[in-house]
Image (tube, rainbow, N blue to C red):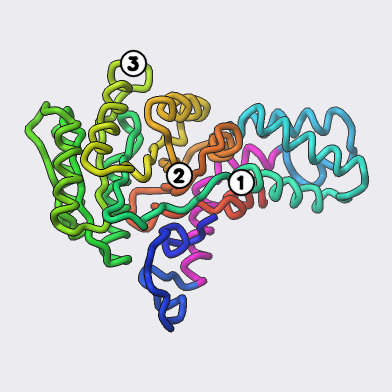
């Protein structure tokens, strides 16, 4: 799984003789440690709720009540029923067989098991196509447009890639304006349509323009549709088909933004969106302040959709690649 931006982007670049830290977007170790501190702080509500129950002394007596309390704590943090059951069963088996002994060792093993469940699929964003087309979906209020802008900034300013944005959320004027501001900031070109125009036509033109301009990446913003509205979900599938007509095999990535504060509802959104347009990865937003931080583990563990990026705040640097072990440790390491 990815730890920094150089890890998350899969590129066909000549490696040369440059040291890894000299590559575009490379981060110093202190930057990574700084992000882990912020992640830990922003998952504070979830961690406080968990560590009130899940601490070394919980494992002093290993009986049915111990495992029931552990299950309840993980479910309350929205880790998900299936993921919780699998993890607790495995930990209980290892404790009973004597493979893992002692409260601290069991707590550390719990972190490892949760990280394993979150480590599914390919956590990278594949940019080896010419151009790579990324379609981003998500319901209103998940931070989708802002996330696209931040992603475009990292691609353009750190990776020195040419980016075209497609403002296919034509039903919300503010979304187009917001994306245009980010395009300017990121040094990206933007393709827009008239208010209320067909989103598919904007997506088609964005991909066409990307090919014409020799862009490396085209990112298409789609309308923030409610996952309960079948007609709008059908429209999302249509946009995907239109993109494929312009460029065979596109979109190469379909990323879904999920608001972490919605908990299990976010899991349901991911299920339904993936039916309309196969989702290659999730961007989990608004982790700052939520008590439902376990949802990242539920999405990965129960849907087997990799969480590729996480957002823990409004600042540019608060959008980051997802690292399952760091995430699990931030949830449980008191």
Q: Which residue is mark 1?
A: 331
Which secondary structure lies at badge 1?
helix
Whether residue 293 is visible to the viewer of this picture, yes or no, is no
Residue 3 position, x and y percent, is 51, 60
Residue at x 55%, y 45% (from the top left corner): 121
Q: Earlier in the sequence, mark 3 or mark 1?
A: 3
Q: Which residue is mark 2?
A: 288
Which secondary structure lies at badge 2?
loop
State yes or no: residue 97 in magenta.
no
Q: Is residue 115 left or right of residue 64?
A: left
Callout in the foreground (2, 3): 3
Please tell me whether residue 268 is drawn above or below residue 17 in the rendered image. Answer: above
Residue 282 position, x and y percent, is 44, 40
Instruction: Please state the extent of the stretch shown in magenta in the rendering.
Output: 29-52
Please tell me whether residue 43 is drawn above or below residue 213 in the rendered image. Answer: above
Residue at x 38%, y 26% (from the top left corner): 276
Residue 175 position, x and y percent, is 19, 37
Q: Which residue is mark 3?
A: 230
């Amino acid at each position: 799984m990815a730890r920094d931006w150089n890890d998350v982007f899969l590129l066909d670049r000549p490696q040369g003789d440059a040291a890894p830290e000299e590559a575009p977007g490379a981060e110093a170790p202190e930057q990574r440690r700084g992000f882990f501190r912020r992640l830990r702080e922003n998952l504070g509500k979830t961690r406080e709720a968990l560590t009130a129950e899940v601490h070394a002394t919980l494992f002093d007596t290993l009986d049915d009540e111990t495992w029931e309390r552990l299950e309840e704590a993980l479910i309350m943090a929205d880790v998900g029923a299936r993921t919780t059951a699998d993890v607790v069963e495995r930990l209980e088996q290892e404790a009973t067989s004597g493979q893992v002994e002692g409260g601290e060792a069991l707590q550390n093993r719990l972190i490892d098991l949760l990280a394993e469940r979150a480590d599914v699929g390919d956590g990278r964003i594949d940019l080896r196509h010419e151009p790579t087309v990324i379609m981003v979906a998500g319901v209103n209020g998940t931070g989708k447009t802002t996330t696209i802008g931040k992603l475009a900034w990292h691609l353009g300013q750190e990776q020195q890639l040419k980016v075209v944005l497609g403002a296919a959320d034509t039903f919300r004027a503010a979304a187009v304006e917001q994306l245009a501001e980010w395009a300017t900031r990121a040094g990206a070109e933007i393709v827009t349509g008239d208010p209320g125009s067909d989103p598919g036509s904007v997506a088609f033109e964005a991909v066409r323009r990307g090919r014409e301009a020799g862009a490396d990446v085209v990112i298409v913003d789609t309308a923030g549709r409610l996952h309960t509205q079948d007609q709008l979900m059908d429209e999302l599938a249509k946009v995907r088909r239109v993109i494929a007509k312009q460029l065979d095999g596109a979109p190469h990535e379909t990323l879904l933004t999920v608001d972490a504060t919605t908990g299990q509802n976010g899991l349901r959104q991911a299920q339904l969106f993936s039916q309309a347009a196969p989702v290659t990865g999730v961007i989990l937003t608004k982790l700052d302040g939520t008590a439902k931080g376990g949802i990242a583990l539920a999405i990965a563990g129960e849907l087997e959709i990799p969480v590729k990026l996480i957002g823990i705040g409004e600042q540019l640097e608060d959008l980051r690649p997802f690292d399952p072990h760091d995430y699990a440790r931030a949830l449980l390491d008191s």
